[in-house]
Amino acid sequence: MASGLRGADAVASFLSGRAEAARLALVDGVPAAVWAHRNRPKAVFSFTVADGKITSITVDTDPHRIREHDIVLLGAAQEDQPDRGSLRER
């Protein structure tokens, strides 16, 4: 899938529309993005940054690994936080 992509334009074209619904988050305290369906995280986008540029993006969709993460969505009001056990928002 994404393993054969090279360069910023190719990666941007591939992700265009696919990651549109992902939200900025802290995953185990590290900046990332999370895509959720019905308030349950389904994909975690982890970024490797070098010299101020994203050099790689890893997408994890394994439900068992995702459950092990502490995920906090960024940019949401305190009163909009969902119940514990799904996603938390900050």
Image (spheres, rainbow, N blue to C red):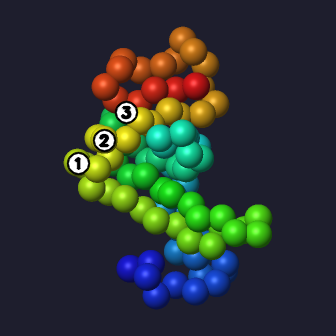
SS assignment at label 1 = helix
Sequence-wise first label, 2 or 3: 3
Q: CA distance from mark 1 to mark 3?
A: 16 Å
All told, the count of numbered labels is 3
Front of the two marks 2 and 3? 2
**Which quadrant is the N terminus positioned in?**
bottom left
Q: Residue at x 32, y 46 (%)?
A: 66
Q: Would you name the residue on which mark 1 appears? A: 64
Front residue of 31/81: it is 31
Mark toward the viewer: 1 or 3:
1
Question: Can residue 37 be seen in this snapshot?
Answer: no
80 versus 21 height, above or below: above
The answer to whether marks 2 and 3 mark residues whose Cβ atoms lie closer than 8 Å is no
> Are the residues at dot 2 and dot 1 in contact (C-beta closer than 8 Å)?
yes
**Dot label at residue 68:** 2
Kind of residue at badge 3: Asn
The residues bearing labels 2 and 1 have C-alpha atoms spaced at a distance of 7 Å
Using a 10 Å C-alpha cutoff, classify the residue at mark 3 as few (fewer than 14 neighbours), some (14 to 19) or many (20 or more): few
Q: Amino acid at mark 2?
A: Glu
Mark closest to the chain's N terminus, 1 or 3 = 3
Q: Which residue is mark 3?
A: 39
Q: From this view, report whether residue 59 is shown above or below residue 79.
A: below
Q: Residue 84's x, y, as percent?
A: 35, 20
Q: Which element carries disc 2, helix, strand or loop?
A: helix
